Amino acid sequence: MEVLDLIKERFSPYEFTDKQLTEKDLSTLFEAAGKAASAFNEQPWRFVYALRQNEESFKAIHDCLVDGNKGWTAGVAALVITVVSKNYAKNGTENTVAKHDLGLAVGNLTVQAQAMGISLHQMAGIIPENAINNLNIPEGFEPVTAIALGYYEGESGVKERKAVNEIAFNGSWN
Ligand SMILES: Cc1cc2nc3c(=O)[nH]c(=O)nc-3n(C[C@H](O)[C@H](O)[C@H](O)COP(=O)(O)O)c2cc1C
């Protein structure tokens, strides 16, 4: 079996159409995210989101982005700040794989979005203090990334990837 088209065709656009997303769209995407595996089923991921049509909350998230990401995201259909719970709920010790598990959840969200015709562009370029303050993120939680979402109508922007033999080693590193 070949790699799924949904996976092969995904890329992160810098331009999106004007088409809006709905609460229902976002709810479906977050439901997909929440199906990911996580250490001890901790589900350390959290998402704070805003649709463009909700101007005040959209601006609050947009203000959390670094300048380099502010320009191209001004008109996207939705913005999300991803957050992790830093410690295990059951015993308070550090969850050293919380961001790993957040990544799995965003991976699920990405594939679900691709199936729905929705594109994503993730960003490490955020100002965490702005997210904590603007979005009331509580103690014990850490903002990690932002995600721009919307519809893309243009040519494919799929990028080159490392070959499988550069990333996977049979038996030992070579
Ligand atoms: C965790 C993460 C952080 C990223 N941060 C930014 C960012 O701050 N600004 C940006 O323009 N792109 C950002 N990107 C997009 C990457 O540059 C992009 O995913 C990568 O070049 C591969 O391209 P593709 O997603 O189109 O396959 C980020 C992607 C990920 C997964």
Image (cartoon, rainbow, N blue to C red):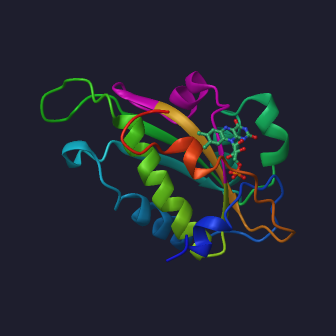
- Ligand 1 resides in the quarter of the picture at top right
In x, y percent, where is residue 117?
66, 74
Q: Is residue 50 above or below residue 142?
A: below
| Residue 128 drawn in magenta | yes
Q: Front-most of 120 and 83?
A: 120
Judge from the rendering whether residue 127 lies leftward or rightward of residue 174; answer left or right. right
Q: Quadrant of residue 140?
A: top left
Compare residues 22 and 13 and report the one nearer the observer.
13
Residue at x-position 77% and y-position 56%: 13
Q: Which residues are the magenta region?
A: 121-142
Q: Is residue 47 above or below residue 25?
A: above
Q: Is residue 126 above or below residue 129?
A: below
Residue at image position (49%, 77%) is 1
Q: Is 155 positioned to the left or the right of 143 in the image?
A: right
Which residue in the rendered view is the most extreme toward the left?
A: 91
Q: How many marks?
A: 0
Q: x, y percentage for residue 153? A: 83, 71
Depth check: 33 or 157 in front?
A: 157
For image coordinates 73% across by 29% down, the residue present is: 66
Q: Please name whichever residue, 117 or 85, is drawn nearer the observer in this view of the structure.
A: 117
Task: Give percent across and percent down for residue 88.
Answer: 22, 33
The residue at 58%/42% (across/down) is: 166
> Any magenta on residue 48?
no
Question: Where's residue 155, x and y in %?
Answer: 87, 68
